[in-house]
Amino acid sequence: MTAGRRRSGRCAGRGGYGLWSGNLFASLAAALTAALSMGFIVDVPVRAAEGYEAGENIQVTTGLAGDLSTMGFTCIDSNYRGGSLFVADEIIPYSLASKYDASDNDYGTSDIRAWLNQYFADTLSVAGEILPVNLTEVDDSISDRVFCLSVDEVREPAYKDFLRSSWTPEQGTRYYWTRSARENTGNLAYLVQYNGHIASSRVSLTQAGVRPAFVIGKGAADHSQGRVWYEGDTQERTIHGVTYTFRCIDPNYSDAGRNRAGALFLCDTIIGGNACIFDENHNGWPASDLRIWLNEGLEDISGIADAVTTTGYTYAGKSSGYQIAESRFTKRKQPGAATKDKLFCLSLEEAVRYGEYLWKLDGSGSDNFTLAGTYSMGYWLRTPAARDGKMCYAVTYEGTVEPRETANDRIGIRPVFVAMQE
């Protein structure tokens, strides 16, 4: 890193709706003591560090009135985006929550998303344990703490018995919303009916309630202890105050210096380019704003190895069709400054090596980076393009690997790091 270098004005820390903090465990301990003294048995969520298994239930206090002041949430997936996915056992009626929206089926700007994150999330007794997640359906880089499930998730066979079992409808709970817009419409969204069927309706419907979901993280991992990492293993790392899940894609990674450095972990999601551009003026990785932003923002470096990230070549050419092959590019040797980093972007050579992962997000088994957000139309590689000092390679949602202007904030960031192997 360059000593004393100021961060560019085009780079900033990412923020979301803000995380609630408080003495959660002290409150839970007091509640447990009081309940036991009165002879009650209570289900208290204090095992986040160990993780939960599908089917486990927790009781969560909320800021809602009446019978919904305490709600049950059931774990339906113990390995969902780095944590355990919990879904409410009951539906919150429209009168206590919010309609989807007045007229627009864009979940990213909807009334229901704002209510869940700006009001409901802060009132939950497990707020401090919730792991914010990035939703692919929204065009911003804000992480959601509480959310509606997608229509694909309610169709998921593993979740069907819980999410689509029938219930007795009451006022405002005849249906519950998903976060998925109906295709080719501007005011229709998918919902689940009381008989378990999936339908769609106008977003202004008042007979539909909210069935909130959230992810409880598995606790802060002790990265300082050595262990053996395998392909598919995950770690959580915090960059500029936001926690991301990283997944091992190579347990025997060789860096740009041909050193067997450790296990390579790739971020499951794309950080929006509005957080930081590659650079305002040039395509050189060693002095780039992006390199500085990544390494300044990494909050815990324990267990992370220094990797050689020197870029010794420039390239010309492009690939397409969600495939990448070395034969599509021509290279020219360009000696550059030697660099080592804890957190970095893949090179073009590494993109070729790990081509099967380039368009897979969130641990998907198939290519699912096929839709673009405003600031995530692609993500940067650290390799400069030939013949132009302001072009660098990027992986795009359109299935290409091609040069883009380094000042383009529509290209996001998908960082990697190397974990030390025991």
Image: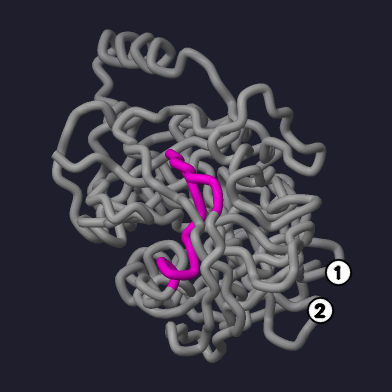
Highlighted range, magenta = 336-351
> Residue 64, can we see it?
yes
The residue depicted at 23 percent of the width and 35 percent of the height is 50
What is the three-letter code of the residue carrying label 2?
Gly
Q: Quadrant of residue 14?
A: top right
Above or below, 94 against 126 in this view is: below
Above or below, 66 against 419 in this view is: above
What is the three-letter code of the residue carrying label 1?
Ser
Quarter of the C terminus within the rendering: top left
- Where is residue 270 drawn, in percent x and y? 57, 58
The residue depicted at 74 percent of the width and 78 percent of the height is 188
The residue depicted at 57 percent of the width and 46 percent of the height is 146
Residue in front for this viewpoint, 350 or 215: 350
Mark number, residue 186: 2
**Residue position for label 1:** 103
The residue depicted at 43 percent of the width and 39 percent of the height is 342
Quarter of the N terminus within the rendering: top right
Residue 163 drawn in magenta: no
**Residue 7 in the figure: left or right of residue 20:** right
Above or below, 65 against 110 in this view is: above
Which comes sooner in the sequence, label 2 or label 1?
1
**Residue 281 in the figure: left or right of residue 69:** right
- Where is residue 6 drawn, in percent x and y? 73, 28
Q: Quadrant of residue 122?
A: top right
Residue in front for this viewpoint, 216 or 303: 303
Marks 2/1: CA–CA distance = 8 Å
- Where is residue 372 drawn, in percent x and y? 67, 72
